[in-house]
Amino acid sequence: MSEHTDKAKSSMEKCIEALKGNFARVRTGRANPHILDAIKVDYYGQPTPVTQLAGVKVPEASMLVVEPWDKSALRAIEKAIESSDLGITPSNDGVCIRLPFPRPTEERRRELAKECNQLAEEARVAIRNVRRDRNGKIERDEELSEDEQTREKKAIQKITDTYVAKVDELLKTKTAEVMEI
């Protein structure tokens, strides 16, 4: 392995990790604690992630329970969830916040599948951009002969194909999860 292929692999792996994170935030009918990762609560003047202020449990497939460690933050957490774009109405019982996940309709599942397709396409584009950047660096590398450059480009293409296949596999899995009734 050369420096070029190592860097390409590293960058493409980051694209895959970003895609996994994006897929985790896609709301299916199943409760997923990662959906709260991006929500920040104003806690003593500091924007703080919900996951740092409370324990998040999944007691059943369609319910999340958020239990703040500091009960005075309960109202702030509820307000942050309400103002987020989750589309879930939290219910506060004074001790914890319950987030019911209604089963999505067929139409909504199709929309979510389209959203997943879009996220996957963005990941594929990012991977191809890594390939383009690496190939450009290979072409500018004056220490490499033409044969070595061709060999490096072929290796980069092989890595690209592998990572695009990973994206396709992740998409297939996520689409099946989204379309599940």
Image: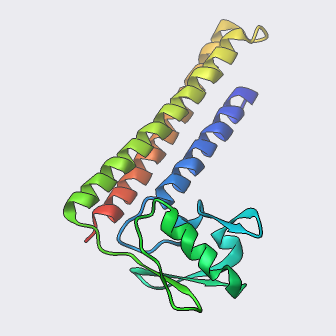
- Screen quadrant of the C terminus: bottom left
Q: Residue at x 49, y 69 (%)?
A: 82
Q: x%, y% of residue 100?
A: 40, 79
Q: According to the image, what is the colour scheme of the structure? A: rainbow
Q: Residue at x 39, y 58 (%)?
A: 174
Between 107 and 142, the residue placed more toward the observer is 107
Above-or-below relation of 36 to 126: below
Above-or-below relation of 24 to 101: above
Q: Residue at x 72, y 84 (%)?
A: 70
Q: In the figure, is residue 107 to the left or right of 12?
A: left
Q: x%, y% of residue 66?
A: 57, 81
- Examine the image and state in which quarter residue 46 appears: bottom right
Residue 69 visible to an observer of this rendering: no
Between 178 and 16, the residue placed more toward the observer is 178
Q: x%, y% of residue 111?
A: 29, 53
Above-or-below relation of 46 to 3: below
Between 163 and 122, the residue placed more toward the observer is 122
Q: x%, y% of residue 152?
A: 64, 21
Seen from this angle, which residue lies furthest left? 106
Residue 12 visible to an observer of this rendering: yes
Q: In the figure, is residue 179 to the left or right of 32?
A: left
Above-or-below relation of 23 to 165: below
- Screen quadrant of the N terminus: top right
- Examine the image and state in which quarter residue 2 appears: top right
Between 106 and 8, the residue placed more toward the observer is 106
Q: Residue at x 59, y 59 (%)?
A: 38
Question: Total of numbered circles in the picture?
Answer: 0
